Image (cartoon, coloured by chain):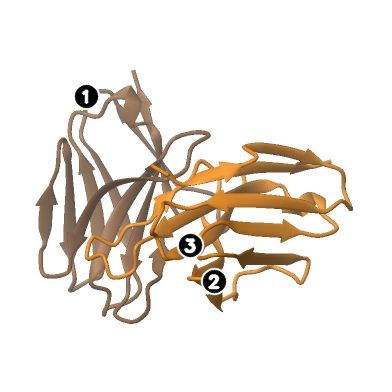
Chain colours: A brown, B orange
Amino acid sequence: GESVGLHLPTLSVQEGDNSIINCAYSNSASDYFIWYKQESGKGPQFIIDIRSNMDKRQGQRVTVLLNKTVKHLSLQIAATQPGDSAVYFCAEKGDAGNMLTFGGGTRLMVKP
Amino acid sequence: GAGVSQSPSNKVTEKGKDVELRCDPISGHTALYWYRQSLGQGLEFLIYFQGNSAPDKSGLPSDRFSAERTGGSVSTLTIQRTQQEDSAVYLCASSLVGDPNYGYTFGSGTRLTVV
Protein backbone atom coordinates (compact mmCIF):
# COMPACT_ATOMS: atom_id res chain seq x y z
CA GLY A 1 0.00 0.00 0.00
CA GLU A 2 0.86 3.59 -0.35
CA SER A 3 2.53 5.45 2.45
CA VAL A 4 0.30 7.39 4.77
CA GLY A 5 1.02 11.06 5.22
CA LEU A 6 1.17 11.88 1.50
CA HIS A 7 -1.29 14.29 -0.05
CA LEU A 8 -4.15 12.45 -1.66
CA PRO A 9 -4.30 11.83 -5.41
CA THR A 10 -7.49 13.13 -6.99
CA LEU A 11 -9.75 11.64 -9.63
CA SER A 12 -12.15 14.04 -11.29
CA VAL A 13 -15.05 12.63 -13.30
CA GLN A 14 -18.16 13.95 -14.97
CA GLU A 15 -21.52 13.10 -13.42
CA GLY A 16 -22.93 10.01 -15.09
CA ASP A 17 -19.55 8.64 -16.15
CA ASN A 18 -18.03 5.50 -14.64
CA SER A 19 -15.19 5.89 -12.14
CA ILE A 20 -12.31 3.54 -11.52
CA ILE A 21 -10.19 3.91 -8.39
CA ASN A 22 -7.07 1.82 -8.12
CA CYS A 23 -5.04 0.48 -5.24
CA ALA A 24 -1.81 -1.48 -5.09
CA TYR A 25 -1.50 -3.65 -2.02
CA SER A 26 1.67 -4.88 -0.43
CA ASN A 27 1.18 -8.34 1.06
CA SER A 28 0.79 -11.27 -1.31
CA ALA A 29 -0.59 -13.31 1.62
CA SER A 30 -3.48 -10.91 2.26
CA ASP A 31 -6.77 -12.77 2.14
CA TYR A 32 -9.42 -10.10 2.59
CA PHE A 33 -9.84 -6.65 1.07
CA ILE A 34 -12.21 -3.81 1.74
CA TRP A 35 -13.06 -0.47 0.17
CA TYR A 36 -14.09 2.39 2.43
CA LYS A 37 -15.69 5.72 1.55
CA GLN A 38 -15.05 8.80 3.66
CA GLU A 39 -17.20 11.88 3.22
CA SER A 40 -16.16 15.23 4.57
CA GLY A 41 -16.44 15.41 8.34
CA LYS A 42 -17.26 11.73 8.76
CA GLY A 43 -15.40 8.54 9.51
CA PRO A 44 -14.72 5.97 6.77
CA GLN A 45 -17.68 3.78 5.89
CA PHE A 46 -17.65 0.25 4.48
CA ILE A 47 -18.58 0.00 0.80
CA ILE A 48 -17.71 -3.48 -0.40
CA ASP A 49 -15.33 -6.31 0.37
CA ILE A 50 -13.79 -9.26 -1.42
CA ARG A 51 -11.97 -12.40 -0.36
CA SER A 52 -8.82 -13.62 -2.04
CA ASN A 53 -10.57 -16.65 -3.53
CA MET A 54 -12.59 -14.31 -5.75
CA ASP A 55 -11.54 -11.92 -8.49
CA LYS A 56 -14.73 -9.90 -8.80
CA ARG A 57 -17.61 -8.91 -6.60
CA GLN A 58 -20.53 -6.64 -7.42
CA GLY A 59 -22.69 -4.45 -5.26
CA GLN A 60 -25.18 -1.77 -6.05
CA ARG A 61 -23.42 0.44 -8.65
CA VAL A 62 -20.02 -0.70 -7.32
CA THR A 63 -17.74 -3.50 -8.41
CA VAL A 64 -14.46 -4.55 -6.85
CA LEU A 65 -11.86 -6.35 -8.93
CA LEU A 66 -8.92 -8.22 -7.46
CA ASN A 67 -5.82 -9.18 -9.41
CA LYS A 68 -3.62 -11.21 -7.11
CA THR A 69 -0.94 -11.72 -9.75
CA VAL A 70 -0.01 -8.05 -9.69
CA LYS A 71 -1.42 -7.28 -6.22
CA HIS A 72 -3.92 -4.80 -7.55
CA LEU A 73 -7.39 -3.89 -6.36
CA SER A 74 -9.83 -1.59 -8.08
CA LEU A 75 -13.19 -0.06 -7.29
CA GLN A 76 -15.54 0.71 -10.16
CA ILE A 77 -18.47 3.04 -9.61
CA ALA A 78 -21.11 3.05 -12.33
CA ALA A 79 -22.96 6.21 -13.31
CA THR A 80 -21.09 8.35 -10.80
CA GLN A 81 -23.24 10.81 -8.87
CA PRO A 82 -22.38 13.97 -6.92
CA GLY A 83 -23.02 12.02 -3.71
CA ASP A 84 -20.11 9.75 -4.61
CA SER A 85 -17.67 12.62 -4.06
CA ALA A 86 -15.50 11.47 -1.18
CA VAL A 87 -12.14 9.97 -0.32
CA TYR A 88 -11.87 6.24 -1.01
CA PHE A 89 -9.50 3.93 0.89
CA CYS A 90 -8.60 0.34 0.18
CA ALA A 91 -7.61 -1.94 3.05
CA GLU A 92 -6.08 -5.41 3.20
CA LYS A 93 -5.99 -8.06 5.90
CA GLY A 94 -2.87 -10.18 6.04
CA ASP A 95 -2.64 -13.84 6.92
CA ALA A 96 -1.48 -13.22 10.47
CA GLY A 97 -2.96 -11.02 13.14
CA ASN A 98 -6.09 -8.96 13.11
CA MET A 99 -4.95 -5.73 11.57
CA LEU A 100 -6.12 -4.06 8.42
CA THR A 101 -3.53 -2.12 6.46
CA PHE A 102 -4.92 0.95 4.71
CA GLY A 103 -3.83 2.48 1.45
CA GLY A 104 -3.23 6.20 1.19
CA GLY A 105 -6.63 7.08 -0.26
CA THR A 106 -7.94 8.69 -3.46
CA ARG A 107 -10.16 11.73 -3.59
CA LEU A 108 -13.04 11.41 -6.07
CA MET A 109 -14.56 14.65 -7.32
CA VAL A 110 -17.72 14.50 -9.40
CA LYS A 111 -18.38 17.43 -11.72
CA PRO A 112 -22.03 18.24 -12.45
CA GLY B 1 -24.35 0.93 21.19
CA ALA B 2 -25.39 0.83 17.57
CA GLY B 3 -22.20 2.40 16.31
CA VAL B 4 -18.80 3.63 17.42
CA SER B 5 -19.19 6.80 19.42
CA GLN B 6 -16.42 9.35 19.89
CA SER B 7 -16.35 12.40 22.10
CA PRO B 8 -15.90 15.24 21.94
CA SER B 9 -16.60 15.72 18.25
CA ASN B 10 -14.53 18.90 18.27
CA LYS B 11 -11.87 20.07 20.68
CA VAL B 12 -9.90 23.29 20.64
CA THR B 13 -7.06 23.46 23.11
CA GLU B 14 -4.14 25.71 23.87
CA LYS B 15 -0.63 24.56 23.11
CA GLY B 16 0.86 22.81 26.12
CA LYS B 17 -2.44 21.60 27.57
CA ASP B 18 -3.39 17.94 27.96
CA VAL B 19 -6.40 16.48 26.16
CA GLU B 20 -8.38 13.28 26.49
CA LEU B 21 -10.30 11.77 23.61
CA ARG B 22 -12.88 9.09 24.23
CA CYS B 23 -14.03 6.15 22.13
CA ASP B 24 -17.02 3.96 22.90
CA PRO B 25 -16.89 0.93 20.58
CA ILE B 26 -19.71 -1.28 19.37
CA SER B 27 -20.85 -3.52 22.20
CA GLY B 28 -19.09 -6.87 22.03
CA HIS B 29 -16.34 -5.73 19.70
CA THR B 30 -13.12 -7.01 21.19
CA ALA B 31 -10.67 -5.09 19.02
CA LEU B 32 -10.30 -1.31 19.06
CA TYR B 33 -8.07 0.88 16.93
CA TRP B 34 -6.99 4.53 16.98
CA TYR B 35 -5.96 6.36 13.83
CA ARG B 36 -4.96 9.94 13.12
CA GLN B 37 -5.87 11.80 9.96
CA SER B 38 -4.28 15.12 9.15
CA LEU B 39 -6.08 17.49 6.82
CA GLY B 40 -6.41 16.04 3.33
CA GLN B 41 -4.30 13.02 4.13
CA GLY B 42 -4.63 9.29 4.74
CA LEU B 43 -5.02 7.25 7.89
CA GLU B 44 -2.06 7.04 10.26
CA PHE B 45 -2.22 4.06 12.61
CA LEU B 46 -1.64 4.90 16.27
CA ILE B 47 -2.51 1.95 18.50
CA TYR B 48 -4.52 -1.27 18.62
CA PHE B 49 -6.24 -2.94 21.58
CA GLN B 50 -7.30 -6.54 21.87
CA GLY B 51 -9.46 -6.56 24.99
CA ASN B 52 -7.69 -4.30 27.47
CA SER B 53 -4.18 -4.97 26.24
CA ALA B 54 -2.35 -3.17 23.47
CA PRO B 55 -0.30 -5.63 21.40
CA ASP B 56 0.70 -2.91 18.97
CA LYS B 57 1.65 0.59 20.11
CA SER B 58 4.05 1.13 17.25
CA GLY B 59 2.17 4.05 15.77
CA LEU B 60 2.20 6.36 18.76
CA PRO B 61 4.25 9.34 17.51
CA SER B 62 5.85 10.28 20.82
CA ASP B 63 5.77 9.60 24.54
CA ARG B 64 3.26 12.44 24.88
CA PHE B 65 0.68 10.06 23.45
CA SER B 66 -0.85 7.27 25.52
CA ALA B 67 -4.02 5.22 25.45
CA GLU B 68 -5.85 2.86 27.69
CA ARG B 69 -8.88 0.66 27.51
CA THR B 70 -10.85 -0.54 30.48
CA GLY B 71 -13.44 -3.27 30.84
CA GLY B 72 -12.82 -4.31 27.27
CA SER B 73 -14.95 -1.40 26.19
CA VAL B 74 -14.28 2.35 26.38
CA SER B 75 -10.88 3.64 25.34
CA THR B 76 -9.23 6.96 26.08
CA LEU B 77 -6.43 8.50 24.01
CA THR B 78 -4.47 11.08 25.98
CA ILE B 79 -2.16 13.66 24.48
CA GLN B 80 0.01 15.52 26.96
CA ARG B 81 1.54 18.95 26.38
CA THR B 82 -0.20 19.32 23.04
CA GLN B 83 1.66 20.83 20.11
CA GLN B 84 0.27 22.45 16.98
CA GLU B 85 1.35 19.46 14.88
CA ASP B 86 -1.06 17.34 16.94
CA SER B 87 -3.96 19.08 15.21
CA ALA B 88 -5.82 16.41 13.26
CA VAL B 89 -8.91 14.24 13.27
CA TYR B 90 -8.54 11.30 15.61
CA LEU B 91 -10.56 8.29 14.45
CA CYS B 92 -11.49 5.25 16.45
CA ALA B 93 -12.67 1.95 14.99
CA SER B 94 -13.74 -1.36 16.43
CA SER B 95 -14.13 -4.88 15.08
CA LEU B 96 -15.19 -8.33 16.17
CA VAL B 97 -12.19 -10.62 16.05
CA GLY B 98 -13.06 -13.89 14.42
CA ASP B 99 -15.87 -12.43 12.36
CA PRO B 100 -15.24 -13.62 8.81
CA ASN B 101 -16.59 -10.31 7.55
CA TYR B 102 -13.77 -8.51 9.09
CA GLY B 103 -14.19 -4.84 8.45
CA TYR B 104 -13.72 -2.13 10.97
CA THR B 105 -16.55 0.18 11.95
CA PHE B 106 -15.32 3.72 12.39
CA GLY B 107 -16.60 6.54 14.55
CA SER B 108 -17.00 10.05 13.20
CA GLY B 109 -13.79 11.19 14.84
CA THR B 110 -12.66 13.97 17.13
CA ARG B 111 -11.33 17.04 15.39
CA LEU B 112 -8.52 18.40 17.55
CA THR B 113 -7.23 21.91 16.99
CA VAL B 114 -4.23 23.11 18.97
CA VAL B 115 -3.88 26.89 19.00
Return the residue nearer the eye: B23 or A60.
B23
Q: Which mark is residue B32?
A: 3
Mark 1 crowd level (few <14, some 14–19, many ≥20, 10 Å Cα): some
Q: Residue furthest front?
A: B71
SS under mark 2: loop
Can residue B42 be seen at all in this image of the molecule? Answer: no
Q: Amino acid at mark 3?
A: Leu
Is residue A2 placed above or below A37 in the rendered structure?
Answer: below
Q: Chain of mark 1?
A: A
Check disc 2: other Cα within 10 Å, few if <14, some if 14-19, many if 20+: some
Left or right: A1, with B48 as reference point? left
Q: Disc 1 on helix, strand or loop?
A: loop
> Considering only vertical position in the picture, is B20 above or below B64?
above
Report which residue position mark 1 lands on.
Answer: A16
Residue nearest the viewer, comparing B63 with A109: B63
| Quadrant that contains the C terminus of chain B | top right
